[in-house]
Amino acid sequence: MSGQTEQRAAPLSRIDQSEEPVPPDAGPDAAADGQVEPTGDQITDSPTGAIDAGEGFGAESAEAARPRPTPRVPEQARPTERIPAARDVVGTTSGSALTDRYRLLQRVGSDLSAGAEFWRAEDTVLRRPVAITVLRRLPADDRSDDPEGAARAGEMVVRALRSGCFEHVGSARLLDVLAPGSHGLPGDVLGAAVAEWVPGRNLAEVVAEGPVRALRAARILEPLTAAAMEAHQQGLVLGCDHPQRVRITPDGRAQLAFLLPRPSVTAADDVRGLGAVLYTMLTRRWPLSVADAVRAELVSADRTPSGALRSAAALRPGVPLELDTLCTGALGQSEGLGRVHTAAAVHRLLTEVLAEDDESALFPPVHDGAPAEPDDVWQDEDRVVDTRRDPVRRRNLTIGLSVLAVCVLIVLGYVGVQVGSLFGAGGGPAPIVVGAPPVSGQAPAAAVAPNPAPAVQAPVSNVAVGVFDPTGDGDNSDDISAVVDGDPSTSWKTQQYLQPFPALKPGVGVMASFVSAEQLSQLKIDSPSAGTVIEVRSAPTANAEFADTVPVTTVTLQQGETVVGLADSQPTQHLLLWITKLAGGGTSNVSQLDEVSFDRAVQ
């Protein structure tokens, strides 16, 4: 009887769900006449089946096993032609396989604007977890140029193939790309990208228990900003403007976990995405798409009556000004000078904030509204306890100041004795005066050797130059050769910056390389940009890091030609002219170099 009951319930569940196909033994006319009686015939109409079910159970069992009428499905609700279609498209469910290698385990998110779903899956060949971004076929729309999204999926797959060589600690590594039409893809799948699985938690889980400490949030975001910066330098984009594409590893690193960004994503969208991830960790609110926030189980960000986004500091007092400004600028809420346009600028500002925090690690941090982490050196009680009225501490402080005062007096006394002996009357020999007759009884002084003749200057030829810009893309690098072409009418200039250095970058420079090491005697710079400050630095190679260069001298340019003496410098093959201050001011900060020449000393 139990077997008959389960068989009787099965057809009803299939009809209610309307996603499973009609049983193959139900008869060819089951879907056409709108009734489930064919499947009921299989279950109840067979006398043999009823007798077999009743044997050995008595009268009650036989009564329970007696055939009962099977309910009919209303004509308007019956499963019709959609059932065979469902058999063709069903495939992206838990436990389904892609290309006989990958098995889908759990859907962890979706990006409807890209027609993508994010799955945790298993590589059945290598027995390892993977992250798969599945591109679903869209419902047919005859009014669209791309009715089912096939062109969109093809463009996304091509972009993924171009980014196959990109590897960075801030992004999951691409392992495989399933192009449209690949063998084993379900009918509703237009393509997929397989990446390494990023362990840890998603953004909603990280902020579920409360906002993240401000500086900890900066450290979490730093690897993702570095990945975005390197990707943009290679002409790629990440698509990190969706909350479910980013995961936080157990060791506290934000990584792009799911690939295949939508075709319309640009580098500016990545910058907004970086600002959105930081804003979410600080406030527990997602500041971009409301629909994405709902799907990611995040709260949408608050806005003012005028529609402007409320700043992180307004929602959470104690957020450092630098991080609040970075959030606002990256999200595009600032106009003019406060706008952050590139991932490189976001990364540089974050590293500066973290470097300043590392320098002040010996002091308790300012309370930013979030509780201390268990592994933090400074806990909340360290900041709360007030020891200003502790008598022991006051006595130790008094003793320390007294000892310091005694030491200062000893040093001042020693310095006074030395200065007095230096300027006091002494019995030393009389000073020698050049050209004066010798003193009676004293041997004539040795003749002073005349100064050597000045060295002959010779210009250095075959100088190669390039733009040195570690944090940017090189200001007008196509025009840099004009500074050594011998023609003052041609020139090279920097980009026009809305803020002076080092607001957006520490500086920009010109790297000059010689055929061999040269002992330079002087440098001539012809420029109309008076007030430009240039550091002359020696470099070991043309592509050296800025930290490996050695300063030689600093010069402020005048109108026209400025001569810089280098007679005391060491021989070098690479010389960097590092601009630390641009000419102009306000929102127009730019410097121009017309001609640069180098002279060496010839004895």
Image: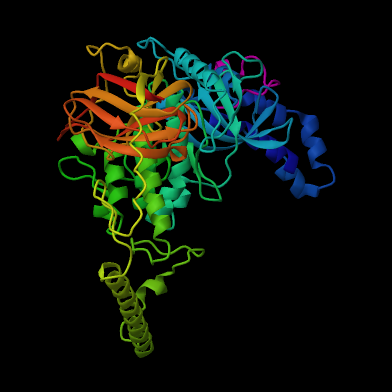
Pick whichever, 84 or 446, lies toward us: 446
Residue at x-position 50% and y-position 42%: 247
- 58 relative position to 474: left or right: right
Tell me, what colour scheme is on the image? Answer: rainbow
Q: Position of residue 195 (x, y in %)?
A: 59, 31
Magenta segment, prevailing SS (helix, strand or loop): loop
Q: Residue at x 42, y 61 (%)?
A: 361
Q: The C terminus lies in which quarter of the figure? A: top left
Q: Is residue 544 above or below residue 447?
A: above
Q: Most extreme residue toward the right, as rendered?
A: 56
Rendered residue at 36%/40% (across/down): 449
Q: Nearer the viewer, residue 143 or 195?
A: 195
- State the residue in front, 518 or 305: 518
Task: In the rendered view, tell whether residue 482 sits above or below residue 307.
Answer: above
Q: Is residue 293 visible?
A: no
Instruction: Count numbered badges in the picture.
Output: 0
Q: Give percent across and percent down for residue 105.
A: 62, 37
Residue 395 drawn above or below residue 324: below
Q: Position of residue 366 (x, y in %)?
A: 33, 63
The extreme front residue here reads 441
From this view, report whether residue 104 is shown above or below residue 395. above
- Residue span colored magenta: 19-34
Residue 201 in magenta stretch: no
Q: Along the line of sight, which residue is nearer the eye, 283 or 328? A: 328
Locate the N terminus by quadrant: top right
Give the percent coordinates (x, y) of residue 545.
46, 35
Quadrant hosting residue 560:
top left
